[in-house]
Amino acid sequence: MEESDEYAAGAGPFDTAFITELGAPLTGLYLYLHGSLAMGCYREDRSDIDLLAVIEEKLDPEVWTRLARGLLELYRLMPGHRGMEVSVILRQYAGEPLHPTPFEFHYSEAHRERYESDAQYVCGGYEDPDLAAHMMVIYHRGITLYGEPAQSVFRPEKEMYIRSIWSDVEHAVEQIAEAPVYYTLNLCRILRFLREGEVSSKKEGGEWGLSSLPPAYEPLLRQCLLQYGGQTDEVSVEPRMLQAFARDTLNEIKQRMTEEGIHP
């Protein structure tokens, strides 16, 4: 895939950081960009830089503390950026995925303060239900920063992807009023995948919803897209409208999951 200007500006230092911190030259390292930066809708003040690294075998624990220090240094060189989310998995789970997926290392804004205050802290050795979705996005829409192309490394499975994205929205009726843009656009892109098989960004999901969902929801979708794009600071929609949207889309999502033989 072609590297966009956004990629060159936002993700360029990461391939060098991984190679430097994990050891260079390093064979058996594969690094991929996914999320909004890979799909052309990145905003540095609102979006994470999303990365997934794949390694052939387990590494010594000090490797992860070294990588964490390198990522913290990158964060300090990125004023104005929201942050980054980085996970590292073994190649066996890329080619033969499990859900939830075991990971060796994880760094995100939620863990940054702990990494800063504790030089020995490492988040790793757990399982993450989001990784199945990340791998599907990388396979279809990701950018290879280092190593083999994604199609040579990943074998994402449709059912695992659906279960992964479902876990993000299953409580949308109760929570959409607190995060209307996140849930509205996510519900759209999940429903688009179930209807058409297209892997979408949040922005693309919302744009699809404008032409594919009932006209009554057009004002909500337009407001969410404007807020996501930074043209407005808030979404002014009554909670009952948000909940009705979440209820309607979740009902169709659950119906289509059942038709696929996947029970929510």
Image (cartoon, rainbow, N blue to C red):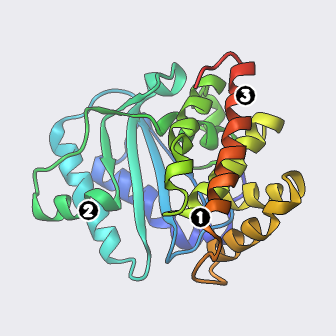
Q: Position of residue 210 (x, y in %)?
A: 84, 61
Instruction: Judge whether residue 146 can be spotted in this image.
Output: no
Q: Nearer the viewer, residue 256 or 46?
A: 256
Q: Nearer the viewer, residue 58 or 103?
A: 103
Indicate left or right for 14 with 34 as reference: left
Please tell me whether residue 159 is drawn above or below residue 45 in the rendered image. above
Q: Nearer the viewer, mark 2 or mark 3?
A: 3
Which comes before the other along the chain, label 2 or label 3? Answer: 2
Indicate left or right for 63 with 89 as reference: left
Identify the residue at horizontal 55%, vertical 44% (top origin): 169
Q: Nearer the viewer, mark 1 or mark 2?
A: 1
Q: What amino acid type is highlighted by mark number 3?
A: Gln
Please tell me whether residue 78 is drawn above or below residue 69 in the rendered image. below
Indicate left or right for 166 with 121 as reference: right
Mark 2 vs mark 3, CA separation in Å: 39 Å
In the structure shown, which secondary structural element does the residue marked by tag 1 occupy?
A: helix
Determine contact: label 2, label 3, CB under 8 Å. Answer: no
Which comes before the other along the chain, label 1 or label 3? Answer: 1
Mark 1 vs mark 3, CA separation in Å: 24 Å
Q: Nearer the viewer, mark 1 or mark 3?
A: 1
Q: Which residue is mark 3?
A: 255
In the structure shown, which secondary structural element does the residue marked by tag 2 occupy?
A: helix
Which comes before the other along the chain, label 1 or label 2? Answer: 2
Q: Which residue is mark 2?
A: 112
Instruction: Judge whether residue 137 can be spotted in this image.
Output: yes
Determine contact: label 1, label 2, CB under 8 Å. Answer: no
Mark 1 vs mark 2, CA separation in Å: 33 Å
In the structure shown, which secondary structural element does the residue marked by tag 3 occupy?
A: helix
Q: Position of residue 128 (x, y in %)?
A: 39, 36
Q: Quarter holding the C terminus?
A: top right
Q: Which residue is mark 1?
A: 239
Identify the residue at horizontal 70%, vertical 48% (top origin): 189
